[in-house]
């Protein structure tokens, strides 16, 4: 009967270890949730970059092949032809201001998990605590018998 109780302490430590690994470990359920959130964030960033890239490609094509579009963009940027005279108003947005910053670096978020060593220590402490509890209970029971 005693060995069964001490074995229970060992199995409790193992069960706690497995529980923490399953939920909070490096490959646990909490980590999977964080990775899915990061994947969604990076997917949104990729969509934004693709839209910005499409806008820039359209702008480049229009500037390469359409002289009127080139003249409009140059006037919006404050340039004119040799025979033109105009007043440039400061503080207005330019044609290049799209509100999207395509060169913005998207940093990966550091993921939070409990290291395996910490989980092992927690499980060992719980198992040892139950073991000590059963050991003290056995000592007290044996003293009461005599």
Image: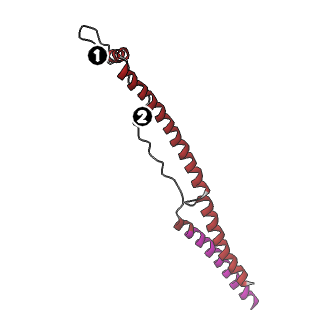
Give the tally of numbered discs: 2
Q: Is residue 11 above or below residue 35?
A: below
Q: Residues within 10 Å of mark 1 (few under 14, many from 20)?
A: some
Judged by its main secondary structure, the magenta piece is helix
The percent coordinates of residue 93 (x first, y second) are 38, 20
Mark seen at residue 79:
1
The percent coordinates of residue 119 (x first, y second) are 56, 66
Quarter residue 139 falls in: bottom right
Which part of the image, by quadrant, shows the C terminus?
A: bottom right
Residue at 49 percent across and 39 percent down: it is 46
Depth check: give the residue in front, 11 or 136. 11
Q: Mark 2 points at which residue?
A: 102
Residue at 62 percent across and 59 percent down: it is 23
Q: Is residue 34 above or below residue 26?
A: above
The percent coordinates of residue 6 (x first, y second) are 68, 80
Drawn side of residue 86 relative to residue 123, left or right:
left
The percent coordinates of residue 77 (x first, y second) are 32, 19
């Amino acid at each position: 009967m005693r060995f069964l109780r001490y074995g229970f302490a060992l199995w409790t430590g193992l069960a706690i270890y497995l529980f923490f690994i399953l939920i909070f470990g490096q490959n646990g359920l909490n980590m999977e949730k964080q990775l899915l959130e990061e994947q969604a964030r990076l997917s949104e960033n990729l969509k934004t970059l693709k839209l910005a890239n499409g806008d820039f490609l359209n702008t480049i094509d229009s500037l390469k092949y359409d002289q009127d579009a080139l003249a409009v963009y140059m006037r919006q940027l404050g340039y004119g032809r040799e025979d033109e005279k105009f007043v440039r108003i400061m503080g207005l947005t330019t044609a290049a201001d799209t509100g999207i910053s395509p060169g913005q670096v998207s940093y990966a978020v550091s993921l939070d998990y409990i290291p395996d060593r910490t989980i092992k220590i927690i499980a060992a402490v719980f198992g040892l605590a139950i073991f000590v509890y059963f050991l003290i209970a056995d000592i007290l029971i044996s003293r009461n018998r005599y």
